[in-house]
Image (tube, rainbow, N blue to C red):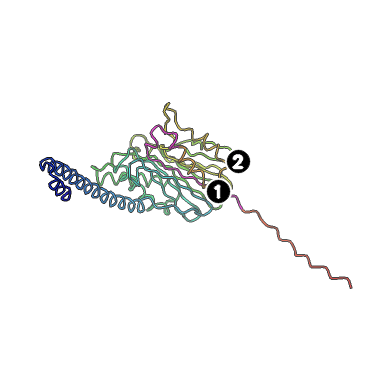
Amino acid sequence: MVLRLVLAVAQGDPATDTISAELVLAAVIAASVWVSQVRTRYERDLSEVTAVAEVVQRVLLRPLAPRLGRVELHLLYVSAAAKARIGGDFYEAVRVPGGVRVMLGDVQGKGLGAVETASVLLGSYRASVTEAPDLAALADRLEAGLQQYGAWDPDSDAAERFATVLLLELPDDSDVVRLVSCGHPAPLLQHAGRVRPVAFTDPSLPLNLAGLYVSRHVVEEVPFGPGDRLLLFTDGVSETRDRAGEFYPLRARLGGWTDEPADRVLPLLHQDLTAYGEAGLDDDVAALLLVRPPEPAAVSARPTARPARPTP
């Protein structure tokens, strides 16, 4: 800019026009520097918030082991909040003596209040999962934990929110799965190439709504043998709508993927959901695929034949 001004004076150009042009250029440069500083500060703050969210996710929603006992686990989890890592959907799977226990749930609403309620239920589950004698008792303890938290902090969002929860138990010594549904969508069972929802005879109310109706938690039991798959999901999957307002046809889609490897099913589901939704995914999405791998074929032991002696 100084060189341009010197050249303009040396060439006899009007100094007023040259100085005005340089002042405009200086103002644009100053504005650009300010915008750059604001953007850099925003990116730094966002990086710090993302790091905190990742730590919170590792504490609340820990990565699942790919296999527990006789069960393979495949997880899909997507938060609806932009730049978020966690939401109101939650999950957990724990190896207990004699089997595996699994929980999948969905808290009413979104945002930090839903995350708070999910954290309370996850803490209650981890504290009680190995001590509860059965799934009905475990569901009672989750209900009690949420009510105690609401009494301890009545002004918190957790005191006003309810949650749908699905509890499962997969014993090591039998080819069955035991389930308790607290207002949660029924999982889809894939058996012999066919897909059907699990039929609950007596589902319970969502947690934190026990005061509305006196009910007990009933444990259901369905066959779950080698080669079977069970898909657990939240309403972010089943209630995704297209432009015409039609719900996502989850059962039909899963029926078309019966021949796909288990580790490919949930990536296909995520891709298909994103393409199906009118605005992509506008709700938290959690899906958990449980697989009972086929038993390895037994190899019969045969005596090794001795080589024939050469004829003299």
In the picture as drawn, the residue positioned furthest to the right comes out as 312
**How many residues crowd mark 2 within 10 Å: few (<14), some (14–19), many (20+)?**
few
Left or right of 55? Residue 217 is right
Is residue 148 rendered magenta in the image? no
Looking at the image, which is closer to me, 178 or 15?
15
Q: Which type of secondary structure does the marked residue at label 2 adopt?
A: loop
In the picture as drawn, the residue positioned furthest to the top comes out as 244
Q: Amino acid at mark 2?
A: Ala
Looking at the image, which is closer to me, 202 or 235?
235
Residue 303 is situated, as x and y percent measured from the top left of the image, at 75, 64
Q: Amino acid at mark 1?
A: Arg
In the image, residue 249 above or below residue 37: above
In the picture as drawn, the residue positioned furthest to the bottom comes out as 312
Is residue 293 rendered magenta in the image? yes
Q: Please say whether residue 128 is visible from this viewpoint.
A: yes
Left or right of 182? Residue 158 is left
Tell whether label 2 touches label 1 (CB within 8 Å): no
Checking the image for residue 292, the label placed there is 1
Mark 1–mark 2 Cα distance, whole angstroms, equals 13 Å
**How many residues crowd mark 1 within 10 Å: few (<14), some (14–19), many (20+)?**
many
In the picture as drawn, the residue positioned furthest to the front comes out as 11
Residue 72 is situated, as x and y percent measured from the top left of the image, at 51, 50
- What residue span does the magenta drawing correspond to? 273-295
User: Which residue appears at 37% of the width and 43% of the height?
Assistant: 79
Say whether disc 1 or disc 2 marks the residue closer to the N-terminus: 2
Q: Please say whether residue 183 is visible from this viewpoint.
A: no
Residue 237 is situated, as x and y percent measured from the top left of the image, at 43, 37
In the image, residue 57 above or below residue 113: below
**Residue indicated by mark 2:** 192
Q: Which type of secondary structure does the marked residue at label 1 adopt?
A: loop
